[in-house]
Amino acid sequence: MTLELHPLLAQARTMPLIAILRGLAPAEALAVGQALYVSGFRTLEVPLNRPGAIECIALLVQGLPPDALVGGGTMLTTDHVDAVHAAGGRLMVSPNCDPVVIRHAVARGMLVAPGVATPTEAFAALAAGAHALKLFPAESLGPAGLKALKSVVPAGTDVWPVGGVTPESLAAWVAAGATGFGIGSQLFAPGADASTVRERAAAYVQAWGATRP
């Protein structure tokens, strides 16, 4: 099984830290997005299981530079895919592996990163056309679980741990085979202002840089 390098995956790989903005309000979306962009983040995900998510995606797409990749998280249905795509989002992230939804997002030309926790889910996701794998929940699987998964999936598969990742733990995950990360409440939670988000984001960017050759 050969993993196709989607152009958006090549773009995401330049800074593979994904900001998960759960609970982002439209009124603060652009300020938070700009704070993340200035800090070095280039990929932003707004989960759909909170009000205003689609509006936030549209605002971020319109307000950030062209090299920012914006999309949705907790995308569970083909309707979710269509709504995010219509808002300009080009990233599909889910907590689960649903081949029907994966194939639909692939057909839309989106960068598709479904959630997996087992080799069975990982291979099903890749067979459906997924471009990267979201390892979730990462905190319960740990770097050892990632290392085991990486030993069986095709070489070069992008795997992004999500859940409980801190700047201090980044290096251990990278050593186990992580190629990027989704970062949620440690980066942004409702009520966090743009300056706080910018400071937290800078710490992750610095930690990621320290793992580079």
Image (cartoon, rainbow, N blue to C red):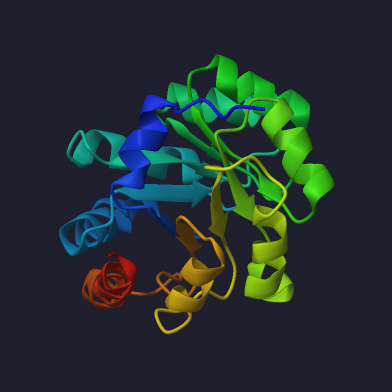
Which image quarter is the C terminus in?
Answer: bottom left
The residue depicted at 20 percent of the width and 64 percent of the height is 39
In this view, 163 is above or below 158: below
Classify 56 as above or below 197.
above
Q: Is residue 136 above or below residue 211?
A: above
Position of 170 with respect to 148 (left or right) is left
Q: Residue at x 21, y 55 (%)?
A: 37
Residue at 42% x, 55% y is: 18
Which residue is outermost to the top?
Answer: 107
Q: Which part of the image, by quadrant, shows the N terminus?
A: top right
- Image location of residue 161, percent across then percent down: 57, 61
Q: Residue furthest bottom?
A: 168
Q: Position of residue 186 (x, y in %)?
A: 46, 76
Give the percent coordinates (x, y) of residue 142: 67, 74
Q: Is residue 152 left or right of residue 191?
A: right
Residue 187 appears in which quarter of the rendering? bottom left
Q: Quadrant of residue 98?
A: top right
Q: How many marks?
A: 0
- Report the front residue among 113 and 3: 3
Q: Is residue 58 visible?
A: no
At horizontal 28% and vertical 47% (from top left) the residue drawn is: 14
